[in-house]
Image (cartoon, rainbow, N blue to C red):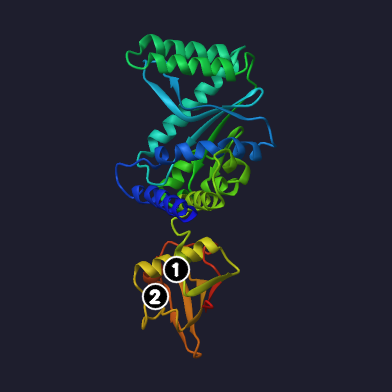
């Protein structure tokens, strides 16, 4: 039974990752039910163990101009604080829409901070949606009951706007411009998906009666969403890769690119059966590196020659110092 569960868990996570590659799939919706299990604990860790509770996912915030709401992925609350949590992934295309949403959330935050009762304000806005809705009245009524139960009937002192984004969003020029607009200021927070992996705990999984295997699978899922090169080293299980003085994540990226370009196969310049280590330096604009072989030989790749093999968009701080390669013991 354990092996069967393990197979399902792996297949479940891989299905989500495979669907992420398709153009019409929104990975935010795919992982929301999983993330919801761990979100309260994550928020407690970054906010000094405050008693933070989830009010509702996909919480509708009504626009002033019409009855069409903008949903925030999660609405949470502490004693006198509200948290608006939004997931954004690197494959989202409309960066201006992200910025417009942020402006909208900030406007909502200003309004709720002026009210004497956060509960009354939210209930009034949900009431407006109930009046205009033809199909979802019962669902909005259920949401109103949840707000009345979970949101304090008192004044809110802070509203936190939290974006959970993949690390890769910092490495894309177009997204870097938008993310600069989302830079944490005041009560705005920016988190990474690997932060979610760090809080996948026994306590939370025991709520679901699940095993250590599920814990590992879910932790790895969050890591892989955050970093597409997370498991690159494991693609060559017969060899061990050790990063010396540098970022393991960027080393994984290099190994992944070499693998995709079929440069790791036997007889190639990067045949890991022959390579002892790869040492990196940064040229004026492009990466340089030397491949050191077990027999004592060295092959150099400079400038464009090197960039063609591992990609040209590297900064000095991203390049690892060197990657040591040894054969795994059987």
Residue 152, image x, y percentages: 62, 17
Residue 66, image x, y percentages: 36, 15
Residue located 57% across and 43% down the image: 205
Choose top left, top right, bottom left or bottom right for residue 37: top right
Give the left or right position of residue 12, taking residue 191 as reference: left
Give the left or right position of residue 19, taking residue 212 as reference: left
| Residue under pointer 2 | 264
Residue 189, image x, y percentages: 57, 38
Q: Is residue 135 above or below residue 319?
A: above
Per the image, label 1 sits on a secondary structure element best described as helix
Residue 8, image x, y percentages: 42, 50
Numbered disc total = 2
| Residue under pointer 1 | 255
Q: Is residue 82 above or below residue 203?
A: above
Distance of label 2 from label 1 (alpha carbons)? 9 Å
User: Which of disc 1 and disc 2 is earlier in sequence?
Assistant: 1
Q: On residue 23, which mark appears?
A: none
Residue located 45% across and 44% down the image: 177
Residue located 36% across and 81% down the image: 268
Bin the neighbour count of mark 1 within 10 Å (Cα to Cα): few under 14, some 14-19, many 20 and up: many
Residue 276 or residue 135, whichever sits in front: 135
Residue located 58% across and 38% down the image: 207
Q: Residue furthest front?
A: 1
Q: Residue furthest top?
A: 131
Choose top left, top right, bottom left or bottom right for residue 100: top left
- The reply to whether discs 2 and 1 touch (Cβ–Cβ < 8 Å) is yes
Per the image, label 2 sits on a secondary structure element best described as loop
Q: Is residue 278 above or below residue 68?
A: below
Bin the neighbour count of mark 2 within 10 Å (Cα to Cα): few under 14, some 14-19, many 20 and up: many
Residue 50 or residue 304, whichever sits in front: 50
């Amino acid at each position: 039974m354990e092996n069967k569960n393990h197979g399902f868990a792996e297949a479940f996570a891989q299905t989500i990752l495979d669907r992420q590659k398709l153009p019409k799939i929104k990975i935010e919706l795919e992982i929301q039910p999983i993330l919801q299990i761990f979100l309260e604990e994550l928020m407690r860790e970054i906010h000094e163990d405050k008693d933070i509770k989830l009010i509702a996912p996909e919480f509708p915030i009504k626009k002033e101009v019409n009855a069409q709401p903008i949903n925030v992925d999660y609405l949470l609350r502490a004693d006198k604080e509200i948290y608006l949590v939004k997931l954004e992934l690197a494959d989202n295309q409309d960066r201006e829409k992200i910025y417009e949403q942020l402006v909208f959330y900030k406007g909502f935050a200003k309004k709720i901070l002026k009210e004497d009762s956060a509960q009354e304000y939210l209930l009034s806005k949900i009431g407006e949606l109930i009046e205009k809705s033809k199909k979802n009245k019962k669902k909005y009524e259920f949401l109103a009951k949840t707000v009345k139960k979970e949101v304090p009937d008192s004044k809110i002192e802070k509203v936190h706007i939290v974006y959970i984004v993949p690390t890769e969003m910092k490495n894309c020029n177009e997204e870097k411009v938008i993310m600069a607009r989302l830079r944490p200021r005041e009560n705005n927070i920016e988190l990474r998906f690997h932060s979610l992996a760090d809080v996948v705990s026994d306590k939370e999984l025991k709520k679901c009666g699940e095993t250590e295997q599920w814990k590992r699978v879910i932790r790895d899922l969050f890591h892989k969403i955050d970093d597409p090169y997370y498991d690159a080293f494991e693609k060559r299980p017969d060899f061990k890769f050790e990063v010396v003085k540098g970022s393991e994540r960027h080393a994984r990226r290099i190994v992944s690119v070499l693998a995709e370009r079929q440069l790791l196969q036997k007889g190639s310049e990067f045949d890991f059966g022959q390579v002892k280590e790869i040492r990196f330096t940064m040229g004026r604009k492009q990466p340089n590196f030397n491949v050191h072989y077990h027999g004592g030989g060295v092959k150099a790749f400079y400038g464009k020659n090197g960039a063609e093999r591992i990609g040209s968009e590297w900064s000095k701080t991203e390049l690892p110092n060197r990657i040591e390669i040894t054969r795994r013991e059987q």
